Amino acid sequence: MNNSEVTLPRQLKQTSLQVKVQSNSIRRVVNVISLSALTASLCSCGGPEEALLDPKQAKRDTVSAVSPGQPSTSALPRLEQIECWFENSSESQHASCFKMYVPENHDGPGDRLISFPVIKLSSASKDSEKTPVLHLGGGGPGNPMGFDAGTIEDWLWSWYQEMSVENGRDLYLIDPRGVGFAEPVLVCTEYIPAFLNSLKSDLTIEQEVAWNIEANQRCMDRLVQEGIDMSAYNSLSVARDVELLRQQLRIKKWNLYGVSYGSRYALTLAREYPETLESMVLDATVFPNVRYMDRYAENLEDAFERLISICTDTASCLDELVNPEQRFWSLVDALKRYPVQITIEHPLNKQKLNMVLNANRFLSILYAALYDAEQFSELPQIVVSLENNQLGAFEEKVNDWLEFQTDASFGDASAAAHFCYEESSFIDYPKAIEAAARLRPQLSESAVALLKYSREQCARSPVPAAPPIEGRPVVTDIPTLFLHGALDPVLPVEYLEQQLVHFSQSDYEIFNEISHSIVGVHPCGVPMASAFYNHKLEFRGYVDCMELQ
């Protein structure tokens, strides 16, 4: 969870959906481990020393919220039903599709409207009065839900039904503004050819940074020339979009499900519109007052040390890989001195593509793979294969990484706008850079490069810094369930535990063998969410899967 650059948040693409379809994260970031570990894109900012923020007082400190029936520009928001572009899986299941039009800038003049998709899965209980569930998107920020025909059928009817339509609740799903099926999609097409071309060479970190800066600047210049208001793509705007959607649907309240950066959208809604929420299930939570990037260096190193220590503590792993720590870092050193030429399949035209696998790319690809806990058991095969100049189990990781890096539905410019607006201005860059310089030598150079690159890109960005409210804790009594993976490489468990004090009506569950996102990955995730929507803080008495945890 994972950036001032237009590319940076690609790295945080991984959500419960992406874990299912094996589409890993990372992209549009300087192609070095520091970028690959871009925890800041999925991060928030602020610190415990900041003043606590009560939702009932929030509107006095921030830009005024859109009032019901009073759109903030001359362009009227509207919801239009459209024909769905995919097949219902059976006659008993019914989907309705919509396009929601909202002002691009909720506070600015003019009549420019943008849109985002809305899918409704109707409950079989036609007369049910249960509060519906709203899924706030694929996280990232910038991550699409995966609404493409041919993909959506693989998960739409199976992933969330138990906690919604089978439970008598309608389910609404969206792609937030700027990503996926939204219009416009703020993707940096300038990046893809530059990225693919860079793979052919063993570039230094300075060379990686140079081409990223150039491609990202061309992207931002183009979007501004096209009339895109980059300052309007942030969590507050998404929250206002959701409030307008609620008004159009005439829904009294939501039950929210937010995964990864979608949890920050949920917390922004809790701050701005607490009266519209019945409960929240937050999966791999991103807190607005936690300055993840300040501890970027430590968390990056911790992720790799955790990977190695799990092997060291597992007999079967040690049988395959003797001295895992020494072997792992020796492999990194060898790839730095003697990069390996590999041939892979071009993700766009399926033709063969030559790629240089150097140390930075190896670490970037492996770090991205850690969003899926299965990768922790594959370390021996990966190390042994590469020691013998073979890809082996690592080939799948490379392909996933390339697929993500060239995904044209990822809103990387939108993600960069989020980062520069609501995160970068709260980061203590000198402190973070000093910490990065103290990392082990295999990580420090690229980590320092990423931090400097992030700072520079936001300084050049057309996006202003957010007001202080975006870096403060959200304090709420809305019933909230937190689900979190103990192996999460970008959102350490201790951050969640520190934040519970701000949620007076909450419970949480840590899943020891899971990484980033729980619902759809662990068999207890959906039953817990479903029981929580029904019974709130009494939910544990209605869940029979806890023996699996």
Image (cartoon, rainbow, N blue to C red):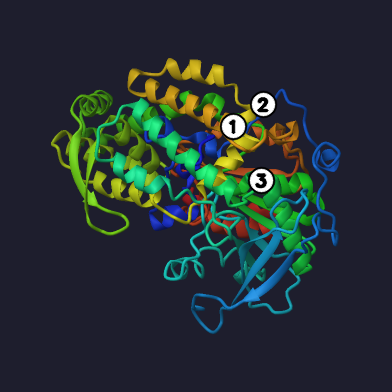
- Residue drawn at (36%, 52%) of the image: 403
Check disc 3 and report the residue beneath it: 235
Q: Which residue is mark 1?
A: 495
Front one among 371 and 203: 203
Determine contact: label 3, label 1, CB under 8 Å.
no
Image position, residue 153 (x, y; %):
46, 71
Specify which label sits upstream in the sequence, 3 or 2: 2
Type of amino acid under label 2: Gly
Q: CA separation, marks 3 and 1?
A: 20 Å
Q: On residue 47, which mark appears?
A: 2
Q: Marks 3 and 1: which is nearer the front? A: 3
- Residue 377, given in percent of the width and then of the height, sits at 31, 42
Going by the numbered disc 3, the residue's amino acid type is: Ser
Q: State the SS at label 3.
A: helix
Quarter of the image where one finds residue 379: top left
Disc 1 residue type? Answer: Tyr
Name the residue at 57% across, 66% down: 162
Q: Secondary structure at mark 2?
A: loop
Mark 1 surroundings within 10 Å by alpha-carbon count, few (fewer than 14), some (14 through 19), many (20 or more): some
Q: Which of marks 2 and 1 precedes in the sequence?
A: 2
Alpha-carbon neighbours of circle 2 within 10 Å: few (<14), some, or many (≥20)?
some
